[in-house]
Each structure stands twice: as C-alpha cells, then as structure tokens.
Amino acid sequence: EVQLLESGGGLVQPGGSLRLSCEASGFTFTSYAMSWVRQAPGKGLEWVSGIGGSGGSAYYADSVMGRFTISRDNSKNTLYLQMSSLRAEDTAIYYCAKVEKRMARGIIIRGPATVGDFDSWGQGTMVTVSS
Amino acid sequence: DIQMTQSPSTLSASVGDRVTITCRASQSISTWLAWYQQKPGKAPKLLIYTASSLEGGVPSRFSGSGSGTEFTLTISSLQPDDFATYYCQQYNSYSQTTFGQGTKVEIK
C-alpha cells in the first residue's frame, strides 16, 4: 500500500524559512516523479513544484520560483520542500503527491514527465505564515 | 500558462440525480486531464485520468469525457457519499500543471 507522510509544517514569521518532508513507502520511490500541491484555507488546489524520479529535473510554479526548492533523497525515500522568504499568502496545507505511470500498448506514456495525474496523496501538513 | 475554468462553482442536487461538471482549458490539452474528489479535511482522491479512464476502485457511476478544450465529469446517479468538491487538473506539459477552481456539490 502506498503511503505518503508529510511533516515539518508549523507557524513561521514572514520572511522566515521552513523545510517540509514527505516520507514515502509501499512503492519504488526512485521510479516516480513527485510533486507538492498546496491548498490555502477555504481555497482550491495549487500545484507548487515537481521533481523527476532521479531528482535531476525540478520545476516550480511562478508564485514560488526563487523562494522554494524541491529535492529528494532516494536512499531515504523522502521528498523535501525547502521554503524561504515566506509570505502570508504561502499559508496553506501542503500535500505531497505521487505521479502515476500510465501504460499504453505496453509502453509507458509521458515517461520523462515530471507532472501527471496524482494517484496518491499524503494527509498534508499545515504551514502558517504570520507574525 | 494554461488556465482551467470549471462550471458551475456550486451545484445543488439530490440523491439519484445525474450530475455534470464542466471544465474548460484556455488552450488545447488533448486528453491530458484528471478529475479529483475532495471531502472536508481530507486529501484529494483521483477519480479519472486521461479525460475518460476510471481510476481503480472508483465506482462506475463516475465517468469523464472530452478532448481539446472542453471536458465533463458525470455522476450518473448521485449517492450520499458523493457530496464533495471536485477539481479538474490539466497536465499537458511535462513540467507544469494547473487545477480548476473547484465545483462544490451540495445537497439540495
């Protein structure tokens, strides 16, 4: 069974930093791209960042570019999100999500893709940016 | 960036109703579209991928259709467990993805 367990959320002052972790189990972690998706209180879903299985490719939403860094340690089956220069508008539940690999006629489609449909999600960790 | 627009934002329906939610993309995304269900305090759950493929374990009353810029999620006979918020997501690019703003399905 796939399990994703986020941690590291909390209260931080504007301009501060925080590192989120997502521990994965139940699948071959290194074989799958992963993403962080956030949800501000009472709002919709916003993709934040994604990373390839090897960690060699990483992408960001414009809203966090230059402030957040996604990384992964495949030896520890763990995904990270280093957040700095935090703003009030970064207040949200942060979910890690696994990108599923889809097959067509025996071939993996969108193999190099860093994003796709997210078949598994963690329970989320709350980040509050406030003074 | 590709924008996703869902309609309606809120939908009131009764158990047994046929419900349809629409998602429109600002440019063609072929069939690179997924649908999720989210209940209060819970993580989203994948229902449909590649516009019309049903995720394993999802009841067959859920179906998706469309291609290009217009997509629909249909619930053939609404059940009490289906009252939730639904999101579409486009993943046409290999490196960026966006969600619709959500459609809340309420009890009429």
Image (tube, rainbow, N blue to C red):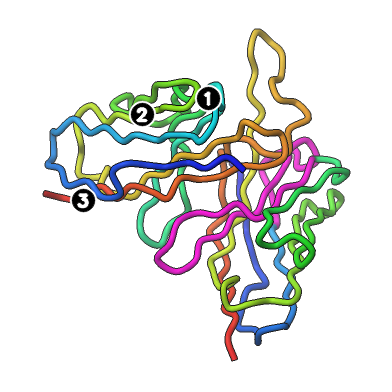
Range drawn in magenta: A23-52
Report the front residue among A107 and B92: B92
Which of the 4 quarters of the picture holds residue B19? top left
Query: Which one is in front in this view, the residue at disc 1 or the one at disc 2?
Result: 2
Give residue A87's position: percent from left, percent from top: 64, 77
In x, y percent, where is residue B90? 55, 36
* Mark 3 surroundings within 10 Å by alpha-carbon count, few (fewer than 14), some (14 through 19), many (20 or more): some
Dot 1 surroundings within 10 Å: few (below 14), some, or many (20 or more)? many
Which residue position holds label 2? B72
Quarter of the image with the N terminus of chain B in it = top right
Residue flagged by tag 2: what amino acid is it?
Thr
Which mark is drawn over residue A57?
A: none
In the picture as drawn, the residue positioned furthest to the bottom comes out as A131
Is A53 included in the stretch rendered in magenta?
A: no
**B79 left or right, relative to A82:** left
- Taking A131 as reference, is B39 above or below it? above
Along the line of sight, which residue is nearer the eye, B108 or A77? B108
Q: Judge from the rendering whether residue A113 lies leftward or rightward of residue B108; answer left or right.
A: right
Q: Quadrant of residue A69?
A: bottom right
Cα separation, mark 1 vs mark 3, equals 26 Å
Q: Please determine whether, in this image, residue B21 is positioned above or below residue B29.
A: below
- Is A105 above or below relative to A77? above
Per the image, the residue denoted by label 1 is B50
Chain name for mark 1: B
Residue B28, position as x, y percentages in the image:
55, 26
